[in-house]
Image (cartoon, grey):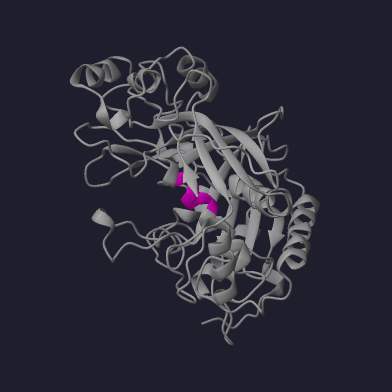
C-alpha cells in the first residue's frame, strides 16, 4: 500500500515497525507531468515502484519465479495475482511526506537557455511493515538499491548531461539520490568494503529463509536478478569534477518556498493550482544552480565512459545503444525501447589511487545463463570492468569464474 502526504494517518499497527528517510533527489525528470503545466511531479508511485521492483530482484535470486511473485504480492498487495488469481492486501505501507515546511514535489533548475535543466526533490519517505520484515528484509534491500542507482526516470545513471550529435543540444540525464535514515548522521548507502556487501546479503538470505522457508530453486531468467551468481558490483574512479554544485544547490533550495509547497499549506494538490500559482513557480525557479563543467565527458567517470563505449572507441566496443548492455531509448515508450542491464551511481567517496573526489558504483545484471554461458556482450563488459585500473570488486560475479565459451 502506498499513501501520499495528504492521506489520513491511521493508528499504527502494534505488530509493525516504521522507518523514515530524508531524501534529496536530483534528476532529469520523472514521468509525472502536471496537467496543464509544463513541469514534472514526483509521485508516491515512483517510490512504490522503486521498492517493489528491487524486492523482486532480490527474491528472484533465492526462490522460484512463481513463489517470488507470490511473496512480492503478500508484501505489496495485488488485485489479482498473476500466479494464482488470488487477491492479496499486502502488509508494506509507504508514505511520501513533506520535509518540515518544504514539499516533496521539488524545484526546476534554470541556469540558462544553453544548459540542461534538472529537477530537485526533497521530502521524507516513511516505510512501515511487520517487525520481522522491515528490519531484516526490506531495509537491506533499500540500502543496496540506494547504493547502485536512483529513483524514477534515469535511475540507472548518475546525473550528467548528454549532447545529441545531430543538434549539439545538451540534455540532462540520470539521477543523484541522497537517502539518510532519520536519526542517522550520514547517507544510507553501503560502504566500499566487499566484506560489508557479502555480510549484508548473507544476513538477508537467512532472514528470508527463516520467514518463508524453502520456496524452490532460483530459475535461469533473462531478467535483472540481484544475487552473487547473477550480477557483479564494482567501484571505479569517478569524474574529476562533480557535475553540479550539490552543496550550493541544497543551500539555495532551502531558501525557496515554491508554489507547490504553498499549495500543500493551503491543502491544494499541485495539479489543482490556479494560473497565479503557475506564474509564481516560474518566478521561483533557481537562477544559481551551476553545472561545474561545460564538457559532457567531464561529467562521466570510468564506469560511465565504459557504458558510452561504441565501435569507434579504443578498443572498439558496442555498449551504448546495445540492447544487451547499455539499453536503447525510444520516444513514447515504444516497443523498440530497452532498459540498460547496467546501473551506475556516483558516490561521494574519494579514490585515493586515481585522485578523484568521488567514485562510481557499477552494477551489472548478467541475466540468463545457458549451457554456453552468459550473453557475450555482457560478459565482455564484465571483463572490461574488471580491467579498469584501480577497479574494486564489491559483490557477485568475477571474470575468472566464467567459461570462455559464450553465446
Q: Residue furthest top?
A: 255
x and y percentages locating residue 323 in the rendered image: 40, 66
Q: Quadrant of residue 257?
A: top left
Q: Residue furthest bottom?
A: 371
In the picture provided, is 176 more to the left or to the right than 285? right
- The mark tally for this picture is 0
* Above or below for 65 versus 5: below
* Above or below for 279 versus 133: above
x and y percentages locating residue 209 in the rendered image: 75, 67
Residue at 46% from the left image edge and 18% from the top image edge: 253
In the picture provided, is 104 more to the left or to the right than 207? left
Q: Tell me the magenta residue range.
A: 46-51
Residue 328 can be seen in this image: yes
Q: Nearer the viewer, residue 159 or 238?
A: 159
Residue at 48% from the left image edge and 55% from the top image edge: 307
Q: Nearer the viewer, residue 346 or 406?
A: 346
Is residue 269 one of those drawn in magenta? no
* Above or below for 246 versus 92: above
In the picture provided, is 100 more to the left or to the right than 189? left
The majority secondary structure of the magenta stretch comes to helix
* Above or below for 269 versus 310: above
Residue at 27% from the left image edge and 46% from the top image edge: 165
x and y percentages locating residue 148 in the rendered image: 59, 49
x and y percentages locating residue 18 in the rendered image: 66, 40
Q: Nearer the viewer, residue 182 or 364?
A: 182
Q: Quadrant of residue 110?
A: top left
Q: Nearer the viewer, residue 192 or 254?
A: 254
Residue 383 can be seen in this image: no
Amino acid at each position: 500500500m502506498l499513501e501520499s502526504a495528504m492521506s489520513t494517518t491511521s493508528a499504527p499497527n502494534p505488530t509493525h515497525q516504521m522507518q523514515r528517510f530524508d531524501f534529496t533527489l536530483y534528476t532529469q525528470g520523472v514521468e509525472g507531468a502536471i496537467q496543464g503545466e509544463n513541469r514534472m511531479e514526483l509521485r508516491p508511485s515512483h517510490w512504490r515502484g522503486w521498492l517493489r521492483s528491487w524486492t523482486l530482484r532480490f527474491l528472484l535470486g533465492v526462490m522460484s519465479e512463481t513463489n517470488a511473485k507470490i511473496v512480492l504480492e503478500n508484501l505489496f498487495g495485488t488485485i489479482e495475482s498473476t500466479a494464482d488469481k488470488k487477491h492479496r492486501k499486502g502488509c508494506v505501507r509507504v508514505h511520501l511526506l513533506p520535509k518540515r515546511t518544504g514539499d516533496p514535489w521539488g524545484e526546476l533548475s534554470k541556469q540558462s537557455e544553453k544548459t540542461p535543466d534538472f529537477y530537485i526533490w526533497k521530502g521524507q519517505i516513511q516505510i512501515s511493515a511487520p517487525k520481522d520484515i522491515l528490519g531484516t528484509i526490506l531495509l537491506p534491500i533499500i540500502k543496496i538499491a540506494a547504493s547502485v542507482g536512483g529513483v524514477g526516470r534515469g535511475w540507472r545513471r548518475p546525473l550528467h548531461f548528454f549532447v545529441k550529435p545531430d543538434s549539439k543540444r545538451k540534455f540532462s540525464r540520470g539521477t543523484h539520490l541522497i537517502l539518510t535514515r532519520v536519526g542517522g548522521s550520514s547517507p544510507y548507502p553501503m560502504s566500499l568494503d566487499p566484506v560489508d556487501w557479502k555480510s549484508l546479503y548473507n544476513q538477508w538470505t537467512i532472514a528470508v529463509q527463516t520467514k518463508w522457508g524453502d520456496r524452490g530453486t532460483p530459475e535461469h531468467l533473462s531478467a535483472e536478478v540481484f544475487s552473487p551468481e547473477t550480477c557483479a558490483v564494482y567501484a571505479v574512479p569517478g569524474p574529476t569534477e562533480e557535475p553540479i554544485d550539490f552543496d550550493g544547490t541544497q543551500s539555495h533550495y532551502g531558501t525557496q518556498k515554491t508554489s507547490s509547497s504553498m499549495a500543500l499549506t493551503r491543502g491544494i494538490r499541485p495539479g489543482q493550482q490556479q494560473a497565479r500559482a503557475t506564474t509564481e513557480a516560474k518566478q521561483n525557479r533557481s537562477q544559481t544552480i551551476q553545472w561545474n563543467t561545460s564538457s559532457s565527458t567531464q561529467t562521466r567517470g570510468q564506469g560511465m565512459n565504459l557504458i558510452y563505449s561504441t565501435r569507434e572507441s579504443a578498443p572498439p566496443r558496442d555498449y551504448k545503444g546495445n540492447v544487451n548492455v547499455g539499453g536503447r531509448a525510444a520516444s513514447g515508450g515504444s516497443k523498440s525501447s530497452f532498459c540498460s542491464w547496467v546501473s551506475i551511481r556516483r558516490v561521494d567517496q574519494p579514490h585515493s589511487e586515481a585522485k578523484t573526489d568521488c567514485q562510481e558504483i557499477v552494477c551489472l545484471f548478467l541475466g540468463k545463463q545457458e549451457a554456453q554461458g552468459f550473453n557475450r556482450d555482457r560478459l565482455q563488459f564484465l571483463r572490461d570492468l574488471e580491467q579498469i585500473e584501480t577497479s574494486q570488486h564489491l559483490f557477485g560475479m568475477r571474470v575468472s569464474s566464467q567459461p570462455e565459451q559464450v553465446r
